Image (cartoon, rainbow, N blue to C red):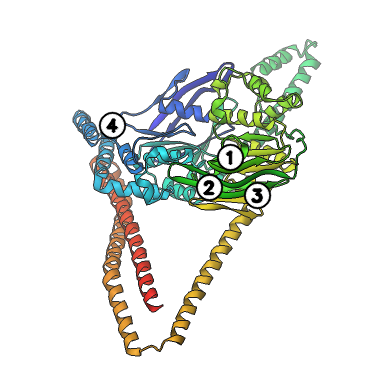
């Protein structure tokens, strides 16, 4: 066991999030917390990590167990370089050694045949491996590998953390957790700020992570590939499912159908019993039987089937009429210190444009939304709205400026106009604020709930130009569909910053791509069509490069007679240099591959040994085999890191040689 939740009870006012919630998480488990926003998933994580105290119950954590927590937002790091910040997350080696010494002393007081003795041995072995990994020589390459996987460049390693935008701040926090390798990872929407490449890298890293993982995410592909157990929260209850997210969706539907059949059968039986009672209660010969049936009815526990949350529809208020030009930028420049995001940039948005804004974090997408909304001025150039353009803007920070003392209803009504005030309750229902939920204070809401309130406030504002920065990050699938349908029917223009292709594809007709160090590019079509265009462009560039190289060779051969002897000498020199440079690296790579294969074979042998009956009852043998297996895993990880570094070195050396001899031939 790495931790246990025992009889947890949490309530906010009259609303009970959890009542007597209990479950155990074992080492190496991957668990998804499922349920609608506001069901209590993030609150539960905060209780596990100790950020919030439950009303009743407790979280049991074995001594020395480390819990790593990645919240949805609210992280800002500054004052140190990126690499130093990540390396500093692993803690003090001296402190870790003290923990090992303390546990070793306690080990002497335990019965060597007991489970406690075996668990302590395993824990000491785990800590000793951590201590070994925290050697600076092996720690730095791992940190660099993690940072590259999350999208940072080598040049970023020396930058101050404070220079990175909010999305990159979350990546820094995630990198620190992955390097530290706590026994438990609590991840609250870890892919919200990741591009596609980083998402894939993270998925692979989490698959091989040795600790336990509890995750909240709306990324179905990630959940399906990673988790083996799902805990679903709904109306104050928690249900467990032994499978991934898709299994949970199917199984929960099947359970609901079974429960409905059972409830119908029970109601039929109750009706039948009641009819008997009504018929024979007054007859003396049947009175005792009727009384017996009455007692039976009183003892029956009614099967309750909760209604599914109804999916409502929402329509934007009619937008005011506007001109053909929505917004215009001319020769606009914008920079933050040494980082230039826009330079002499021209942009015009016309009536009817529905634009998706894409690109890696930090490339200027959010800055651009602030520029075209008029909330931030450019450093140079001209900015102007079109005739009668009226803007409604949802940014990633709007949820942070809500008044904590207002209720949801008060907050939204204050933002609504006279025309849209009658729509308030309907749109709140669309985003799952129903009944007494609307009277909750803003201060008690989860991050996802606050984001939904801020979004509702924006949507109720009559406008002909909508600007939304990552509107789906905190929306569940139902709310995403409601918003998507409303945007599909909306007659105005909009810009949406998002990487959610499922959400964007049906509702956009242009894509604006932001690239670090390069001007933005506009593509016609939806996001899938944009990706196809990029891939086609890459294929054309490769074909042109091949044609150019072939043309250069042919032109050189036609213009200059080639001395065959000199050509043979040049080829021999090329082969000699390639061999001299590449052969040592290739030999080293082959040696590492051989070592990896040997360790894989030994791990398989240990697994076979651990299954033998004569070994399962011998704690000493189990301890030795387990420690050896863990050491082999650590060694293999280091070998894979070396293999990756040498592979990159071979690629770079090959590219340099190709450039050198290609230039010589040209």
Label 1 vs label 3, nearer the camera: 1
Asked whether the residues under the numbered discs 4 and 1 touch, taking CB atoms below 8 Å apart as contact, a structural biologist would say no
Q: Pick the residue in front: 143 or 65.
A: 143
Instruction: Give the CA separation, mark 1 to mark 3.
Output: 25 Å
Q: Secondary structure at mark 2?
A: strand
**Mark 2: few, some, or many residues within 10 Å (few <14, many ≥20)?**
many
Q: Which residue is mark 3?
A: 505
Q: Earlier in the sequence, mark 3 or mark 4?
A: 4
Instruction: Give the CA separation, mark 4 to mark 2.
Output: 62 Å
Q: Which residue is mark 1?
A: 371
Q: Pick the residue in front: 145 or 52.
A: 145
**Mark 1: few, some, or many residues within 10 Å (few <14, many ≥20)?**
some
Name the image quarter holding residue 311.
top right
Q: Secondary structure at mark 4?
A: helix
Q: Earlier in the sequence, mark 1 or mark 3?
A: 1
Q: Earlier in the sequence, mark 1 or mark 2?
A: 2
Q: Which residue is mark 4?
A: 116
**Mark identifier at residue 396:** none
Q: Earlier in the sequence, mark 3 or mark 2?
A: 2
- Residue furthest to the front in view is 381
Residue plotted at (70% across, 25% down): 416
Instruction: Give the CA separation, mark 1 to mark 2.
Output: 11 Å
Q: Earlier in the sequence, mark 4 or mark 2?
A: 4
Asked whether the residues under the numbered discs 3 and 2 touch, taking CB atoms below 8 Å apart as contact, a structural biologist would say no
Asked whether the residues under the numbered discs 1 and 2 touch, taking CB atoms below 8 Å apart as contact, a structural biologist would say yes
Residue plotted at (74% across, 21% down): 273
Q: Which residue is mark 2?
A: 342
Q: Pick the residue in front: 228 or 455.
A: 455
């Amino acid at each position: 066991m790495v931790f246990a939740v025992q009889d947890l009870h949490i309530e906010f006012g009259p609303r009970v999030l959890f009542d007597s919630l209990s479950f155990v998480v074992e080492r190496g488990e991957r668990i998804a917390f499922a349920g609608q926003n506001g069901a209590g998933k993030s609150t539960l994580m905060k209780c596990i990590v100790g950020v919030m105290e439950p009303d009743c119950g407790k979280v049991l954590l074995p001594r020395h167990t480390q819990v790593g927590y990645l919240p949805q937002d609210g992280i800002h790091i500054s004052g140190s370089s990126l690499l130093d910040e990540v390396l500093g997350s692993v803690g003090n080696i001296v402190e870790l050694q003290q923990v090992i010494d303390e546990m070793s002393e306690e080990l002497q007081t335990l019965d060597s045949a007991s489970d406690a003795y075996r668990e302590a041995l395993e824990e000491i072995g785990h800590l000793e491996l951590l201590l070994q990994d925290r050697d600076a020589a092996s720690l730095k390459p791992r940190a660099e590998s993690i940072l590259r996987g999350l999208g940072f460049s080598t040049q970023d390693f020396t930058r101050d953390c404070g220079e990175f935008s909010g999305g990159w701040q979350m990546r820094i926090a995630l990198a620190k957790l992955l390097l530290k390798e706590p026994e438990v990872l609590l991840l609250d929407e870890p892919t919200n700020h990741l591009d596609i490449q980083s998402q894939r890298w993270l998925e692979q890293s989490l698959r091989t992570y040795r600790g336990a993982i509890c995750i909240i995410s709306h990324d179905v592909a990630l959940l399906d590939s990673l988790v083996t157990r799902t805990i679903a929260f709904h109306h104050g209850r928690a249900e467990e499912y032994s499978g991934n997210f898709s299994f949970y969706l199917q199984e929960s539907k099947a359970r609901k159908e079974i429960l409905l059949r059972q409830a119908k059968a029970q109601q039929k039986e109750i009706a039948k019993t009641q009819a008997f009672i009504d018929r024979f209660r007054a007859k003396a010969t049947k009175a005792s039987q009727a009384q017996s049936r009455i007692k039976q009815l009183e003892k029956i526990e009614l099967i309750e089937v909760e209604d599914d949350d109804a999916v409502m529809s929402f329509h934007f208020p009619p937008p005011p009429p506007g001109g053909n030009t929505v917004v215009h930028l001319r020769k606009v420049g914008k920079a933050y210190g040494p980082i230039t995001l826009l330079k002499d940039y021209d942009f015009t948005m016309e009536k009817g444009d529905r634009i998706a804004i894409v690109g890696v974090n930090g490339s200027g997408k959010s800055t651009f939304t602030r520029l075209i909304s008029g909330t931030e001025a450019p450093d140079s150039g001209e900015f102007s709205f079109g005739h009668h353009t009226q803007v409604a803007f949802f940014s990633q920070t709007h949820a942070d400026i809500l008044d904590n003392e207002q209720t949801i209803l008060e907050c939204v009504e204050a933002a609504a106009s006279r025309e849209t005030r009658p729509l308030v309750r309907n749109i709140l229902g669309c985003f799952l604020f129903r009944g007494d939920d609307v009277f909750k204070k803003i201060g008690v809401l989860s991050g996802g709930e606050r984001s939904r309130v801020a979004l509702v406030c924006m949507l109720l504002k009559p406008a002909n130009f909508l600007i939304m920065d990552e509107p789906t990050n905190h929306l569940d699938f139902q709310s995403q569909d409601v918003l998507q349908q409303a945007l599909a029917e909306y007659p105005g223009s909009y810009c949406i910053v998002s990487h959610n292709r499922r959400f964007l594809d049906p509702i956009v007709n242009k894509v604006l791509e932001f690239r670090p160090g390069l001007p933005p590019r506009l593509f016609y079509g939806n996001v899938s069509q944009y990706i196809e265009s990029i891939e086609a462009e890459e294929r054309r560039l490769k074909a042109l490069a091949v044609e150019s190289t072939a043309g250069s060779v042919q032109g050189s051969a036609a213009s200059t007679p080639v001395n065959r002897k000199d050509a043979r000498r040049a080829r021999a020199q090329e082969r000699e240099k390639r061999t001299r440079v590449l052969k040592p690296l290739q030999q080293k790579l082959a040696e590492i591959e051989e070592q990896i294969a040997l360790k894989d074979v030994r791990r398989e042998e240990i697994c076979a040994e651990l299954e033998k009956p004569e070994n399962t009852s011998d704690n000493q043998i189990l301890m030795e085999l387990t420690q050896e297996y863990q050491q082999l895993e650590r060694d293999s990880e280091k070998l894979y890191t070396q293999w990756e570094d040498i592979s990159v070195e071979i690629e770079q050396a090959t590219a340099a040689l190709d450039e050198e001899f290609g230039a010589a031939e040209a």
